[in-house]
Amino acid sequence: MVSQDLGVVGAGVIGLAVAWKAARAGHRVTVFDPSPARGGASWVAGGMLAPVAEAWPGEEAALALGEESLRRWPAFADELRAQGFDCGLSAHGTLVAAFDHADAEYLDVLARYLAGIGREATRVTGRELRREEPGLGSVRSGLLVPSDVFVDNRRLLESLLAAARQCGAEFVAENAESLSGDSVTTASGVRHFDTVVLCAGAHSGRLHSDLAQAVRPLKGEILRLRARRGTLPPPRHTVRAVVEGRPVYLVPRDDGSLVLGATQYEAGFDTGVRARGVRELIEAAERIFPAVTEYELTETAAGLRAGSDDTVPYLGPLSDGVYAATGHHRNGLLLAPVTADAVLAWLAGRPGPEGTEQARPDRNTSEERTDAGVGQR
């Protein structure tokens, strides 16, 4: 493969994964971001790698791409480990819990759908779910999804940043003001490249007209809590739940802390944390895992997911030759390996990995979305 000069715009999990893999493959990489690793939605994410638990009828393209990326995750983590970095990939699966009768009906729809497409998800009673996680409260029923795991998002971001630098990637602490297929313009001037990859998450639509109506910010608030002396420890598994129709998740960390999330709504580029969002998350979590109310609340934060119309990202060339790697919706962490491998394939003149053909940026017409049977939850 011929070495190229590669400009990467954005240093969240997608930009960092692209930069690391490309630099490791011998390309000359320059990344533009004033706050690499810490400035975007990836820093405040839960870390779930959960394509099956996230599945829903009509979103088959998102499921296929997520599963393809999940298959690549062990090798991705091993490559980081070989460079001396541990991303905190867990082998524990996911529990999905329903709080009341209506929530259980929602779970029934998901269980029937997963069974119909041959995915592993075991339907269990609330009592059986509490055997897996004794700290759970009075849940009605649930699903066991052993394939869906989680990663420590902050450890991953710091590892990717260090590994990319170790491989020779250059980081420029500036925002891109404009870009084209061979250049990136910042306040300091214009730099030229063989290839430019747009990985700016929710801000991608501001940087490229092809994505102006395709990528939108979806605000999400999360909380971080820590177990105190005398309280139950966090659950071992990721616990996803539906509480009176509202989704909530609890994701443990090795240090005894717990990530609790996440709200999701449209609020433009506002990243302020609402008191209502904090209250809703704690109330929902208390019904699923009562001990959480005795935990210490250590952080509240909000991030902006890069939403797409059909939950599938935009991967591939735009009209002026810029490559898009954005619009990952709720699944930036999950899709980092397959996205980075897609960029390496493009640089080598090869087709991207399986599933990426459904993510081409020019798919976004209403007719194609209708034909694809895109579902709304």
Image (spheres, rainbow, N blue to C red):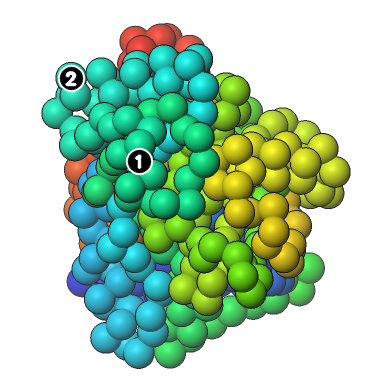
Residue 91 visible, this angle: yes
Helix, strand or loop status at disc 1? helix
Q: Position of residue 84 (x, y in %)?
A: 35, 90
The N terminus is located in which quarter? Answer: bottom left
Question: Mark 2 = which residue?
Answer: 116
Query: Mark 2 or mark 1, which has the lower sequence index?
Result: 2
Q: Position of residue 210 (x, y in %)?
A: 56, 35
Residue at 33% across / 47% down in the picture?
Answer: 131
| Residue 247 pos. (x, y %) | 55, 33
Mark 2, other Cα within 10 Å: few <14 / some 14–19 / many ≥20: few
Using the image as rendered, state which of residue 93 and residue 19 is in the foreground.
93
Q: CA distance from mark 2 to mark 1?
A: 23 Å
- Discs 2/1, front: 1
Q: Residues within 10 Å of mark 1 (few under 14, many from 20)?
A: many
Report whether 80 appears left or right of 215.
Answer: left
On the image, numbered disc 1 is attached to which residue? 129
| Image coords of residue 208 (percent x, y) | 62, 43
Question: In the shown orientation, is residue 251 left or right of residue 66?
Answer: right
Residue 53 against residue 225 in the figure, above or below: above
Question: Residue at (43%, 35%) from the top-left corner?
Answer: 97
Q: State whether residue 7 appears in this view.
A: no
Above or below: residue 206 compared with residue 338: above
- The residue depicted at 24 percent of the width and 26 percent of the height is 114
Is 240 displayed left or right of 209 in the figure? left
Q: Quadrant of residue 213?
A: top right
- Closer to the camera, 43 or 260? 260
